[in-house]
């Protein structure tokens, strides 16, 4: 007799599944072969601010699973260099350079310098966030720490007068940033 394994779903995973099955952007992402609905968040930003217009080098930090990389590749010139960095492995995307690394690592910085060949990025993107804790104020502090790290990183790799888009959670430190 076979034993069956019962996997208990958490309340949050059931909510997530329910929300994403019905969600318009999740459906669109599936129809358009994007890896996640987040591509439409970047689409909204790009439609409003035209951050990808004329970009020669775009770097996405925290890019797994890769929907922002897919969006950038589809919405820029074929000569645009698109680079992704994440702690998690990013499945290959044609003509996109990816690194499985911590973006604060000196080793990565050396590899990026080799790829960029003394050029700087026209756009740096970051939609990354740590797992949320359930405590708004702690989540805000964590996302602000990440944002500050991305900002520090951009001082080295972002060209002057170019674009950076970073995910933030609402909180009292947003104005300071």
Image (cartoon, grey):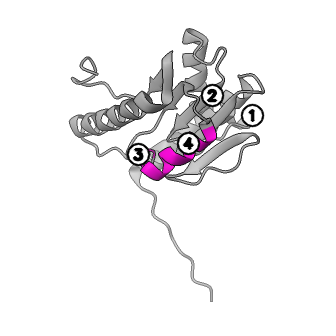
The x and y percentages for residue 79 are 76, 27
Q: Earlier in the sequence, mark 3 or mark 4?
A: 3
Q: Nearer the viewer, mark 2 or mark 4?
A: 4
Q: Which residue is mark 4?
A: 112
Image vertical order of residue 106 relative to residue 8, above or below: above
Reading the chain from its start, which is encountered first: label 4 or label 1? 1
Q: Is 20 inside the magenta-drawn segment?
A: no
The residue located at (47%, 24%) in the rendering is 165
Tag nearer the camera, 4 or 1: 4
The quadrant of the picture occupied by the N terminus is bottom right
Q: Quadrant of residue 74?
A: top right
Q: Which residue is label 1 attached to?
A: 31
Q: Is residue 23 visible?
A: no
* Residues packed near mark 3 inside 10 Å, few (<14), some (14 to 19) or many (20 plus): few
Question: Is mark 4 in CB contact (under 8 Å) with mark 1?
Answer: no
Residue for point 57% across, 16% down: 51
- Residue range of the region highlighted in magenta in the rendering: 103-115
- Count residues near mark 4 (Cα–Cα under 10 Å), then give few for <14, some for 14-19, many for 20+: many
Q: Which residue bears the numbered disc 2? A: 57
Q: Quote the CA–CA distance across marks 3 and 1.
A: 35 Å
Whether the residues at callouts 2 and 4 have beta carbons within 8 Å, the answer is no
Nearer the observer: mark 3 or 1; the answer is 3
Q: CA distance from mark 2 to mark 1?
A: 28 Å
**Pick the front one: 92 or 113:** 113
Write down the residue under mark 3.
104
User: Does 42 sit left or right of 149 as displayed?
Assistant: right
């Amino acid at each position: 007799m076979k034993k069956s394994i019962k996997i208990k779903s958490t309340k949050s995973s059931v909510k997530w599944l329910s929300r994403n099955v019905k969600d318009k952007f999740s459906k669109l992402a599936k129809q358009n072969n994007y890896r996640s609905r987040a591509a439409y968040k970047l689409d909204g930003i790009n439609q409003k601010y035209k951050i990808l217009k004329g970009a020669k080098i775009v770097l996405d930090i925290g890019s797994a699973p890769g929907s922002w990389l897919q969006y950038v590749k589809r919405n820029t010139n074929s000569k645009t260099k698109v680079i992704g960095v994440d702690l998690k492995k990013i499945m290959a995307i044609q003509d996109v350079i990816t690194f499985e690394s911590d973006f604060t690592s000196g080793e990565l910085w050396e590899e990026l310098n080799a790829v960029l060949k003394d050029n700087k990025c026209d756009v740096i993107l970051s939609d990354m966030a740590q797992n949320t804790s359930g405590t708004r104020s702690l989540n805000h502090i964590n996302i602000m720490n990440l944002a500050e790290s991305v900002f520090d990183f951009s001082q080295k790799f972002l060209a002057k007068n170019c674009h950076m888009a970073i995910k933030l959670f609402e909180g009292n430190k947003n104005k300071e940033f």
